[in-house]
Image (cartoon, grey):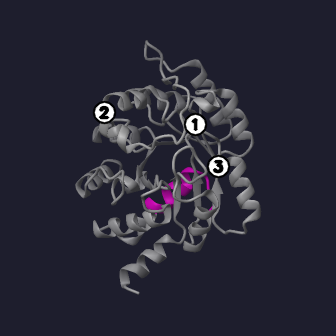
Amino acid sequence: MTDLTARVDALMKGAVDLHIHSGPSLHPRKVDHMEVLRAADAAGMRAILLKDHYYPTMPITRLMNDNLGCQTEAIGAIVLNNPVGGLNPSAVDYALKQGARVVWMATAHARNHLDHEAKEADFKNKFPVNSKKTVAAIPATLTDEAGAVRDEVKLILDLIAENDAVVSAGHHHISEAFPFYEEAKARGVTRLFLNHPTYVNEGSLEDIRSLVAMGVKMEHSICMFIPSTFHLFDDNHLRAVIAAAGVENTFFGSDLGQKNNPTPVEGMRSMIELLIKLGHDDAEVRMMTSTVARELAGIEG
């Protein structure tokens, strides 16, 4: 065993991944929910979150936590795409009352996401395609024509605040994210993050700095920085986004589980190696692969 391997092994213990796309799913998956939990458990990870674009995962995580005998905790979530009624307060209410810890606004069915698919062939080719034909998506926006946060979104934010849950603006454009997070803060939501801010959300480094100043943590997708079908960004971009938010406001979710890609555990190992290569010490690596995500989601140490 090399010194680097031993160092990565040690840093994997206690790691947290809040962005795993395991199966079953309408998108082709490499690993199922139970496989990925067992692999995370074998690596000594503290917790993983199961995210599906089209169904809530908290019933699955409850069953796994109760029956698989793993030390790693599986966390459930809901994504507000069309199959749950879109930006639907009732779906959020029921999900939170059944243990969902994280709520994503629309992802694949955000108008911004659908606009990218319609205009950019490369974007459409990179994002997973449903294995079966589905009805046409109804585009979602967080704000109305005047730029005001929609009433149903306000109610969703009230529910999130009441349950001390976590929220992300999903795949909505950065111009919608700012009023959304302002409204979230005004309504008492304290656990805020934005996933892959420089990807489909089209955020800039200045946007990252501004959102962090508002209390929003930045989650970056590991799959976009390591060899995978989603690789988009070089090491210089990684350095820049970490510097823009600061280590204490940055964390990494694998965003993996798809066929033809590394597994989520493999992805987290690769990210730890990359952060070490960029010169981060163990304390900084642990902050970005465990502490920030753990505290954001309210996971006990």
Q: Position of residue 122 (x, y in %)?
A: 30, 40
Q: Residue at x 48, y 28 (%)?
A: 180
Q: Where is residue 209 in the image (x, y as percent from the top left)?
A: 33, 41
N-terminal-most mark, 3 or 1: 3
Q: Residue at x 43, y 55 (%)?
A: 252
Residue hosting label 2: 120
Q: Name the quadrant of the N terminus.
A: bottom left
Q: Does the magenta stretch include residue 298?
A: yes
In the visual, does 184 lie left or right of 212?
right
Q: What stretch is highlighted in magenta?
A: 287-301
Mark 2 residue type: Glu
Residue hosting label 3: 76
Count of numbered circles on the image:
3
**Given this view, does label 3 or label 1 mark the residue nearer the observer?**
3
Q: Helix, strand, or loop for circle 3?
A: loop
Q: Label 3 to label 1, Cα distance in Å? A: 19 Å
N-terminal-most mark, 2 or 3: 3
